[in-house]
Amino acid sequence: MASNPPGQCCVANFQHDGVPRGQLGEIDEISTYFAYPDAGTDTSSDTAIIFITDILGIYINAKLQADLFAQTLKCTVVMPDLFNGDAIAADAWAKGSVDLKPWLEKHTVNTVDPIIERTIKYLQEEKQIKKIGAVGYCFGGKYVVRFLAEGHDSAVKAGYIAHPSFVTEDELAAIQKPLAISASEIDGIFTRDLRHKSEDILSNTGQPYQINLFSGVSHGFAVKGELSTRHENWSKEQAFAQAVAWLKEYL
């Protein structure tokens, strides 16, 4: 593995304050959150970002982050429901340990890949999108990596992931497009050893890559950290800036 399977740290989260600007709709009967540069307004941009969520799915933090990407990159951001209404509840961690094994067995590449494929088809065929980027957090990081490989029609031109989980060495070695990673110092999923192993793998792909390590923060910091803590808030902002700069460069 290039990163370990999701664990309890993937469930823990601090909900962020804000009012989502986007809209819930559907892509081929898949519930999807749409974020636009201007609230509720479509855009003529030929660029779009697919936001691939963590195990909490389409919840407040992810919506606010998608809105921020749309406003900053001036393009549409789509966030499909990868779990068909079966995401882990955002408040589950406050109620005790969550048994992730049976949940993960229901949500595999066999169920998630087709959802992303249908999302890409919608963007290309119905919205005439020419440039597609992808961002993924924790669980979603695996699927950004998978869709940077040649086997997925090369539709995704660049990817960004933060504190990834469940990525295999073969998946990482297969990328054919630029990839940036935000990593946390305190992380039992994307550990120091696995981070170094991932660096070795990426250096052999011949593709542009970037790994930024943020000290003093834990797995999940880039989308569900405690923003009242100055360092966590700063780290989240810097991880977002990394993602934006990367996508601007390679899309």
Image (cartoon, rainbow, N blue to C red):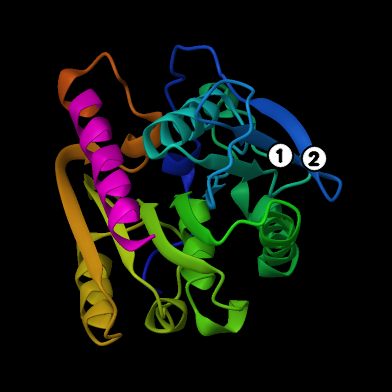
Q: Position of residue 20 (x, y in %)?
A: 56, 18
Q: Earlier in the sequence, mark 2 or mark 1?
A: 2
Residue range (magenta): 233-251
Count the labels in the image: 2
Identify whether 229 is placed above or below 122: above
Identify whether 114 is placed above or below 100: below
Q: Position of residue 5 (x, y in %)?
A: 48, 60
From this viewpoint, which residue is outermost toward the front? 44
Asked if labels 1 and 2 touch by Cβ distance under 8 angstroms, the answer is yes
Residue at horizontal 27%, vertical 33%? 236
- Distance, label 2 to label 1, CA atoms, is 5 Å
| 246 horizontally vs 101: left or right | left
Of 229 and 25, nearer the camera is: 25
Residue tagged by mark 2? 26
Tag 2: Cα neighbours inside 10 Å, few (<14), some, or many (≥20)?
some
| 143 horizontally vs 226: left or right | right
Tell me the amino acid under the disc marked 1: Thr
Q: Is residue 188 visible?
A: no
Of 170 and 207, nearer the camera is: 207
SS state under label 2: strand
Residue tagged by mark 1? 32
Q: Quadrant of residue 176?
A: bottom left
